[in-house]
Image (tube, rainbow, N blue to C red):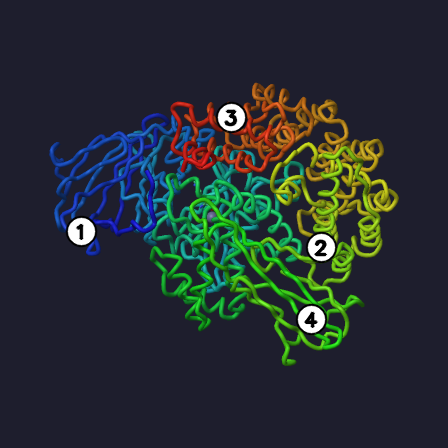
Amino acid sequence: SLIRLEDYRPTDYLIDTVALTFRLHPTDTRIVSRLSVRPNPAGQTGAPLVLDGDDLTLVSISLDDAPLAQDAYTVSPSRLVITAPPQRPFTLTLETAVNPTANTKLMGLYRSSGVYCTQCEADGFRRITYFLDRPDVLSVYTARIEADADTPLLLGNGNLVEAGARADGGHFAVWHDPFPKPGYLFAIVGGDLDKVEDVFITASGREVKVAVYVEKGKSERARYALDALQRSMRWDEDVFGREYDLDVFNIVAVSDFNMGAMENKGLNIFNDKYVLASEDTATDGDYANIEAIIAHEYFHNWTGNRITCRDWFQLCLKEGLTVFRDQEFSSDARSRAVKRIADVRVLRASQFPEDAGPLAHPVRPRAYKEINNFYTATVYEKGAELIRVLKTLIGAQSFRRGMDLYFDRHDGTAATIEEFIACFAEASGQDLAAFSRWYEQAGTPRVTARGIYDAGNRTYTLTLTQETPPTPGQPDKHPMVIPVALGLVGADGREIALKTADGAPHDGIVVLDTAEKTITFSQVDSSPTPSLLREFSAPVILDIDLSDDDLLRLFAYDTDPFNQWQSAQTVATRIIRRAVDDIRAGRTPQTPDNLVHALAEFLDARATRDPAFAAQVLALPGESDIAREIGSDIDPDAIHVARKTIRAGLGRALADKLAALYNDLAVTARYRPDAAQAGQRALRNAVLDLLTAGDPTRGGALAQAQFDSADNMTDRIVALATLTHVAGLACENALAAFAARYADNPLVLDKWFSLQAMIAEPETLDRVKALLDHPAFSLSNPNRTRALVGSFAMANPTQFARPDGAGFAFVADIIIRLDPANPQLASRLATAFRTWKTLEPGRRAHAEAALERIAAATPLSPDVSDIVGRMLDRA
Ligand code: ARG
Ligand code: ZN
């Protein structure tokens, strides 16, 4: 059934306190819930009390401690209705029984490698007990957890208030969280785990015990996560003035988790992939992800927990904002320019296709069938871009004042986007009504820029136009408020001081808030090259009439590193697109000299000055970037060959420089995961990749040597990946050596599964199918499934979209098989089809058939049914 934003109304009852008792048992856990309920003054008097449930068994029920008569309520696994509750405060006591071992959906209370844990967002709390399971019902929780001696560690939200032994040989712990919160932030953990711990002193001098809990024997691998947590805590004090508010902050890593991590109050639960790291097992990228996700979940304590969402339509209120905050944290901890490039790459790779296809939805959706399908790149990544746009529009100072006002005014409440924006309107004195449209309107605006230089008047006139294409349910679009950060670069490569037509200084931000806008700059002495959308100042597609030579001038001279990178990308994209056309027309593509010269100069003069940045330049656009640019009638094989051919040409032309760099860039110091060393490794490995593209024999030899001698996972896995590029599945020895070395490390084996699934050759599908039977593989573990099937579907465009349709059919089979056990995971996999309509007709027909087959499967979860239905335009 469809849930609509406009239908929101407050609950008829409120729940002020929740006292839970868990008797943990692998197959028959009992939960006693004592709720203090009262009629909501904002609700409807005399209404029945309707509590949500999901797969629940009610054992007993009483009201004010007297058993409730059978005819006073109705109950099913998914609902408990008290027909005529007292119209005064009362206590409702419920006992439910659940089976954590059989809980394969990983929502509610489940067991992961023997550890009891919970996942309640978005609607998992109702799988533990009947409740008003929605984010605007805020209660103070106490949780008493009882368990046998084999489960020594018992954790809950808030502070530990009591613990001790029980007569039956077991023990208990009582946790109390003084901060009112919705059920989705509730969590408990029971297990036998190791930990690393420390003390954090807050800015005001409060002592907080911080700890990270992991599987026995792995605690050393949690040190980096603990350090990242402490750095996040300090950063939020320094940059946003936000202090932590409890006596303890615990993080628990589990090995079966549907998403990345969860911000439960004082008790974050993590996918162990985003906690465990050592130089031998984790790449530099893994370290960066751990740092970002630890920060993200910690930052939710204020943006998400202290202030939560009124309803799930407001999801971006906490997610977009918190992504923005974690991006800023990583920018401060590492290189701002490189972080920006990486984030924009992610936005374009994950959000732009969503916005351009059948799953497009506004950052604040207006309706949904299954909320778990709206934890999307649009809500998260585009949501974060909107915060950045807001900050650009009103300025850093007003932005900070607005944040302060938001924290001040809405602390302890469940808020809306309107309330959030009102704080910034007030703090800045600006009318933000037009800006708000970003939250309502789906689709990526396309901005076109045309400039004219008038030598006689020494003026440069820039005309910007915008257009947003129709998206499902939104045929007509309004203009958006688009801040275009810009500069003018002179023929000599120097930045031209911006002056408006009347000679006043201009701040370099043109706000395009109408369909078309023209601005004239004066006192421009020679024809300039415009550098537009600096730092990617808005989530739009920019269409700019610059020649390749103009762009390469920006690559060399722009003061904005983002646009330096962007200019090289744009030129490379054009070149590869032309190569695609050549290939489809039976011609042999050529690598043009202009890009070769530009890169040669770059390698000589600039690459080693900022290696992490240089690595981003050398990576060139990926196959999916090219596909997105082409937009329709896509032949993934042609794109693959085109990109490979152009890169081979570059690799050959630059071979000597690349080989020299590869030697010079070797890291001799002891491994550190910091940005500087990681950047050097990234560049060296990007150099190896390009070198190998030009000369597979030479590159393969270097990769083999690197594979044999690497002292860290980054260099080892890149070497192995390079070997698979050279020899495909024929590099059996290296693959086998890697698997043997890491036979006991599931997270590293995930990399091994993933690498094989990404090989762009026709044998890959059979290999992937065979790997389903590998002893280390399991469809019930989300990380394993994402590594093998997810990588094949999302990161192997030529084989997923095989011309014979076998790739699509295979992934459809897996989705159908997985769905009954874990619908959230199945539905995520199904989004791999989201660009199916952009394919050439043959492949498109195969994709459609696969989708139809999924749609016809019975039973089909609401999760998959929603995704596939929208994909087939049957929303
Ligand atoms: N709030 C979590 C985060 O982004 C994500 C949890 C999503 N879980 C889900 N089942 N939809 O930090
Ligand atoms: Zn989040």
* Label disc, if present, on residue 435 of the rendered structure: none
Looking at marks 1 and 4 on the same chain, the residue that comes earlier in the sequence is marked by: 1
As drawn, is 616 to the left or to the right of 704? left
Q: Can you say whether 317 is above or below 814 in the image?
A: below
In the image, what residue type sits under mark 1? Answer: Gln
Q: Which residue is mark 2?
A: 567
As drawn, is 212 to the left or to the right of 84? right
At x 37% / y 29%, what residue is drawn? 100
Find the distance from the CA under tag 1 to the CA under tag 2: 59 Å
Q: Quadrant of residue 153?
A: top left
Find the distance from the CA under tag 3 to the CA under tag 4: 53 Å
Looking at marks 2 and 3 on the same chain, the residue that comes earlier in the sequence is marked by: 2
Find the distance from the CA under tag 1 to the CA under tag 3: 49 Å
Q: Around disc 4, counting alpha carbons within 10 Å, would you say few (fewer than 14), some (14 to 19), or many (20 or more)? A: many
Q: Can you say whether 628 is above or below 605 in the image?
A: above
**Foreground tag (2 vs 4):** 4
Q: Are marks 3 and 4 in contact (CB under 8 Å)?
A: no
Looking at marks 2 and 4 on the same chain, the residue that comes earlier in the sequence is marked by: 4
Q: Are marks 1 and 4 in contact (CB under 8 Å)?
A: no
* Quadrant of the image containing the N terminus: top left
Which of the pair 786/199 is nearer the observer? 786
Q: Which residue is mark 4?
A: 460
> Which secondary structure, mark 4?
strand
As drawn, is 761 to the left or to the right of 332? right
* Quadrant of the image containing the C terminus: top left
At x 82% / y 46%, what residue is drawn? 592
* Label disc, if present, on residue 44 of the rendered structure: 1
**Residue 862 image point, x, y percent:** 38, 33
> Which secondary structure, mark 3?
helix
Which of the pair 776/340 is nearer the observer? 340
